Amino acid sequence: MSGSVLRGYIVPGLPQPLLAPERSPAWSSLRKSFERVRAEIASSGADLLLLYSTQWISIIGHQMQADPEPVFVHVDPEWHELGTMPYRFRVDAEFARAYESAAKARGLRARTVAYNGFPIDTGTVTALKLLGSRGTVALGGEPPAEPENAIPAGVVSCNMYADRAETLVLGKAARDAVEATGRRAIAIAVTSLSARMFTQVIDPRQDRISSLKDDEWNRKILEILAEGRLEDVSQLAREFSAEANGDQKLKAIWWLTALMGEHNDYDGTVYDYQPLWGTGGAIAGLVPTAKAAARLEFDEESVDVYAGERNVLSGNQESLTPAAPPPAPAAAPSLVAAAPKPVGAYSHVRRVGDLLYLAGIGPRMPGGDSNEVAGGPVRDAAGQPLPYDIAAQTRQTIENVKTVLEAAGSSLERVLDVTVFLIDMDRDFAGFNKVWAEYFAATAPTRTTLAITALPTPIAVELKVVAQS
């Protein structure tokens, strides 16, 4: 028995499209897009709606809803004037227990909850009512007599302290449970994109994205999603959150991409993008396909088993003891005679603890004051462009790194992380990447590749390296 994720969706969780779509053209548009997605889900053949909502906040690990028929009357704590949300849902309790077991097997703290009256968050209620209902939505009054969602739900909490590694592992555990139980799942990430809300009452008819910067970032993310590049969005989540105040650091996207396979091989559809009280309310869908989308370079690592990335309520008393300060930096050695001479007042390498930090190293030839560049300089003394060999420059750069590492008692095999600077990404990346693979295919250190306008000397490539000593 092996299940699968049939498709994934990203939907907003604020209650306006559910409770008051008529008050705003934007909210009305989102309501219609929810209905379009609901019809797709109903005809998909799915037997599980698997939701991760950024509004179900947990602190100690992750929780899975295991009450087979939760019933309650929910009121949003912020927009209570919009009315009540009575609900009665079908929950796949067997799947919840399988999810809990899978999460624990991957090193996470997890537990099921099955208490009468245990509150379900606004995002989950909104998404399940609009995507899982049988065509009518219960609002106001008492909970309906029968469960509203035709397809049973699985619901997991969003740990407010979790970062990328923990959230990826949570998504992979969800995939484990889907496969183990044979479910045909629809994955639903309930999240805003940008999350800056208006802090004063607004006219719903005048709702807008709270800043032009947020709007620009939202549109760029949606452009990438429309191309089916879910993993690329996951890789951009940190930058997006820093620039556009991503909802819970876009954890829901990390969860979704881990659950769906951490790749870009999807047909992507953006159904709608509207403001929701200043936030970026988007509805997007992803269907697995054999046709690979274009890729960015993946730099953030993938984590399979959670081994910790924070010391918050860990339960380990040792973690509550303040960590000893790191040892003071010491030369290891600071200058390496066999490497090209630095062009400024800096060291080739410094050691902190068991790590080596190398200065930016390029393809100048070793030998005292030599300014000869392997593969030729990129410009002459007058600043005019010259032809150069990026493969030769890359090879010499890595050899120079090797020289410095070996002088410090390390090696290329112990490289952990590299930042690459290229002055012409379009021209040089392929040639650089080919030579890189000759040296690092087996060890595969993490890598970030940046395009810059120039380097201090007439070179095309420079590496900034961190390695174990």
Image: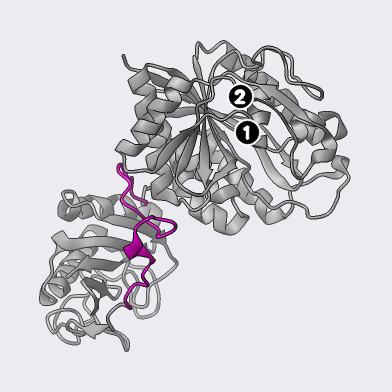
Q: CA distance from mark 2 to mark 1?
A: 8 Å
Q: Main secondary structure of the magenta part?
A: loop
Which residue is at the front of the view, 140 or 133? 140
Above/below status of 309 relative to 456? above
**What residue span does the magenta drawing correspond to?**
300-325
Q: Residue at x 66, y 29 (%)?
A: 125
Q: Type of residue at label 1?
A: Ile
Instruction: Tell me the SS state at disc 1.
Output: loop
Q: Are marks 2 and 1 in contact (CB under 8 Å)?
A: yes
291 displayed left or right of 39? left
75 displayed left or right of 1? right
454 displayed left or right of 404? right
Residue, disc 1: 120
Which residue is at the front of the view, 388 or 344? 344
Residue 230 visible in the displayed image: no
- Label 2: how many residues lie within 10 Å, few (<14), some (14-19) or many (20+)? many
Residue 243 belongs to magenta span = no
Residue 277: which quarter of the image? top right
Which residue is at the front of the view, 326 or 103? 103
Sequence-first disc among 2 and 1 = 2
Q: Residue furthest bottom?
A: 345
